[in-house]
Each structure stands twice: as structure tokens, then as C-alpha cells.
Amino acid sequence: MTDLLKRLASAPGVYRGRGDGLESGPFVARIKVTSVVRGNAITLDYEAVSDSKGLQHVEHTILTASEAGRLELHVTCLELPGVTRFVEHEPGVFNAYEGPMPAKIIMTMPAEGVLTYGWWWSRDDADPREQSRAEVRRTG
């Protein structure tokens, strides 16, 4: 089990904070972290809301280790069809294994009770750029 999965599994709860980005603009974020199967996986239920756009992002993600021991995110959200698998290529950096466009998610825990979650993508063949990033703190 890698450090990120272990740290999140030991710190379940509701995380709240703010976010911003090129595509999203400013928003309020809420991420519920739930440890499942005795910490072998965690679920992330992520919502982003803004005054101008209302509910702009709804996501349900499972973080777990593959058979080979690498972390994977299995993501379903309003913006993607079905479930997209992201594989960790370096600590906290998950590249899309399959998907309609180049994309990655960067997730970190820079301090106890703090989680950052960023979506990066490109609509063409260019390298993905950060489009939205939330920094949330555990509140409950």
C-alpha cells in the first residue's frame, strides 16, 4: 500500500475548501473521503459549486492499488463517459489510461488534514494543463 492511500484511509471524513482554475474559475469544493475494505481502497465523492455556474462538477472516484501494487484512480464524473482509469506514474500524479483527451489528476496531502485535487487536461494533442484545483481541509 502506498503512502497516499494509507494516509487517506487513516483520515476519512468531509473535506471543504476553495478551488480555482483556467476552465473552472473560482469555486467551493467538498470532498468526502471514505475508507472501504479495511483501508484497501478509499472513495472520494467530490462536488464543486460556484455562484456563477451552480453545481459544476460531481465525481465519484475509487483509489486503490492494482495487482502490481501501483495506485489507480477509477473516476466517474459528469464530464467523462463511463469510468476512466488513471494510473499513478509518480507520487500523486495519475495519468489517464484511457479517455477522450489527454488528462491527468494530481492529488497530494501536503499536511495532516489537507488534500489538494487538481484536474489537468488538453482538448488537443498538447500536454495537459491544470484546469481546476481544489485545496480542502478536513472539517468532519
Image (cartoon, rainbow, N blue to C red):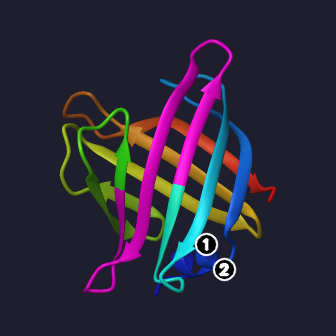
Going by the numbered disc 2, the residue's amino acid type is Ser
Occupied quadrant, residue 80: top left
Q: x, y percentage for residue 44?
A: 52, 58
> Measured along the vertical axis of the image, is residue 104 above or below residue 24?
below
> Measured along the vertical axis of the image, is residue 122 above or below residue 67?
above
> Measured along the vertical axis of the image, is residue 80 above or below residue 22?
below
Task: Give the labeled residue for mark 2.
Answer: 10
Name the quarter where the C terminus is drawn.
bottom right
Q: Nearer the viewer, residue 81 or 25?
A: 81
Residue drawn at (48%, 38%) of the image: 58
Q: Nearer the viewer, residue 47 or 72?
A: 47
Cα gap from disc 2 to disc 1, whole angstroms = 5 Å
Q: x, y percentage for residue 57?
A: 50, 33
Report helix, strand or loop for mark 1. helix
Going by the numbered disc 1, the residue's amino acid type is Leu
Q: Residue at the far front: name it.
A: 37
Residue drawn at (43%, 56%) of the image: 61
Q: Which residues are magenta?
A: 45-74
Task: Give the labeled residue for mark 1.
Answer: 8
Residue drawn at (41%, 41%) of the image: 120
- Rate crowding at label 2 as few (under 14), some (14 to 19) or many (20 or more) other CA atoms within 10 Å: some
Q: Are marks 2 and 1 in contact (CB under 8 Å)?
A: yes
Q: x, y percentage for residue 94?
A: 37, 60
Q: Residue at the far top: name it.
A: 52
